Image (spheres, grey):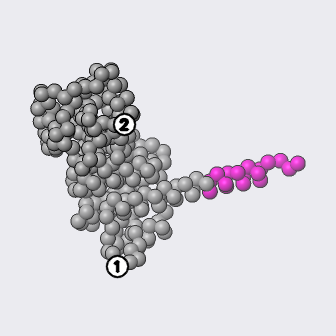
Amino acid sequence: MPVPRPSRSNRGWLERVRSLGQRRVRESEQVCYVEGIRQVLSALEGGHEIEAVLIDPSRLRSETAWATVDDLRGSGVEVVALRPVEFERISSRDNPVGIAAIVRWFPQPLADLAVRDGGLYVVTDDVRDPGNLGTIARTLDAAGGHALIVHGGTDAGHPGALRASLGTMFRLPVHSTSSLDDVFDWARANEVVTIATSAKADHALWDTAVRLPAAVLVGNEGEGLAAGTVERCDLQTRIPMLGTATSLNVSVATGIILYEVRRQAMTRSVDDQTESLHLSVLRSPAE
């Protein structure tokens, strides 16, 4: 297909993108703005509708990106060609790659989240930094988690959160809730073990046995989880602090917990398989 040419009538699209920097607009219209080929591809592969793709033809070098643009245009998605200076106005990068998109995506209600066997979840409570929220989503995906539940704080559709997630927000189920009561009701109804960390916990993370399905609750960057929330959780544990630091970044702490829970689940699975094999040998008839 021919390369789209920048138009003098791009002002409306530039204003549209700028408006999506406002949370109330993202939430009311249930759309978000992302930049970069990985983000756009993740949105597509996650099955989300693309409202428009915005490109700077002078910057777009990737053959994959051009093939994606052609496919989108062929499916009826509007392709908006911007001048370099226009793309710079909507880009958050020092060196824009020349592709961005407006995506119809928004977290779903917690009530729609079905618990699966062996499910691993994260609940964020008032996490305020978009970069931390996006990194938590990315880490949860890497650890084989099954859904992110967002309560308060920044919204999952914030451009910074989407950028930090490296596209995993579009692949990982993301749900939201306005009440922690709903989170504990959901966990209780589905027999999901809730886990919180506390410096006052009796047992270190490595000495805390966790079975799936489980949900890890993490609090905001400054204060962590409220004491009352920690007490409501089924398990309280602590991450040993062996140096002079007294706390960890919330996304780092989340990663440590998730991988320990995943390690335990994998070890338990291997042990169960070994025991099953041992029993089958014992029960087999002698030759």
Viewer-nearest of labels 2 and 1? 2
Quarter holding residue 107: top left
Question: Crowding near pointer 1: few (<14 within 10 Å), some, many (20+)?
Answer: few
In this rendering, position of residue 258 left or right of residue 104: right
The residue sitting at the front extreme is 58
Q: Which residue does the numbered mark 1 point to in the structure image?
A: 244
Q: Is residue 164 visible?
A: yes
Of residues 8 and 279, the one drawn nearer to the viewer in this rendering: 8
Of residues 80 and 225, the one drawn nearer to the viewer in this rendering: 80
The kind of secondary structure element at disc 2 is loop
Say whether residue 284 is magenta.
Answer: yes
Say which amino acid is labelled 1: Thr
Of residues 85 and 224, the one drawn nearer to the viewer in this rendering: 85
Q: Earlier in the sequence, mark 2 or mark 1?
A: 2
- Residue 188 drawn at (x, y percent): 37, 50
- Residue 205 drawn at (x, y percent): 44, 67
In this rendering, position of residue 132 left or right of residue 114: left
Kindly report the distance in space between the C-alpha atoms of the residues bearing marks 2 and 1.
Answer: 46 Å
Magenta range is: 271-287
Query: Which residue is drawn at the image coordinates 48% and 55% (left, top)?
Result: 262
Query: Which residue is drawn at the image coordinates 57% and 57% (left, top)?
Result: 267
Query: Which residue is drawn at the image coordinates 45% and 52% (left, top)?
Result: 143
Disc number for residue 62:
2
The kind of secondary structure element at disc 1 is loop
Of residues 56 and 118, the one drawn nearer to the viewer in this rendering: 56
The residue sitting at the right extreme is 287
In this rendering, position of residue 111 left or right of residue 88: right
- Residue 113 drawn at (x, y percent): 35, 41
